[in-house]
Amino acid sequence: MACVEVDVEKHPCDQPVICTEIFMTVSVQLKDKNGAPVRLDSFRVTRLPEGQNITPAYTGQQLDSYRDYGTYPVATDSDDSLFPKFTPTRVLFEGFIGEREVVSAEYVVKFDCCHVEWVSGERSIVVP
């Protein structure tokens, strides 16, 4: 039997699709000038241009892990219901230490029927 490629850009997601079992995350890595991970007190992800806050509620353990590595999620596969399929979508990532914003970066992400993918935006940022 021959393998038939599917044009995922034209494949409706309400039809059965075979997806990999990996969980994809688009993230940003924050480091200080010495290369140490930046430990944010909080962060926010906003879908643009409408300004909808789409930051999920994270457990304390999840937040500690993000802080330990300085790597914070911008969008994950679990956010698929918040985005149109096959459409590059702008999001704003903002990070805070106390009440002070220390990072603000715009990203473009896109979802297919299965996963999120990074389109543009800085994946590693040095926070002054």
Image (cartoon, rainbow, N blue to C red):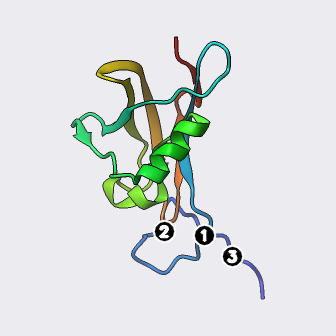
Disc on the earlier residue, 2 or 1:
1
For label 1, the residue is 6
Neighbour tally class for label 2: few under 14, some 14-19, many 20 plus, Cα within 10 Å: few
Marks 3 and 1 in Cβ contact (< 8 Å): yes
Residue at 34%, 36% (x, y): give it.
44
For label 3, the residue is 4
Label 1 element class? loop
Q: Is residue 118 visible from the viewing direction of this image?
A: no
For label 2, the residue is 11
In front of the other: 32 or 52 = 32
- The image position of residue 27, as x and y in percent, is 54, 40
Residue at 43%, 60% (x, y): give it.
78
Label 2 element class? loop
Residue type highlighted by circle 3:
Val
- The image position of residue 93, as x and y in percent, is 40, 32
Query: On screen, 22 above or below 108?
Result: below
Residue type highlighted by circle 2:
His
**What is the quadrant of the N terminus in the image?**
bottom right
Residue type highlighted by circle 1:
Val
Label 3 element class? loop
Disc on the earlier residue, 2 or 3:
3
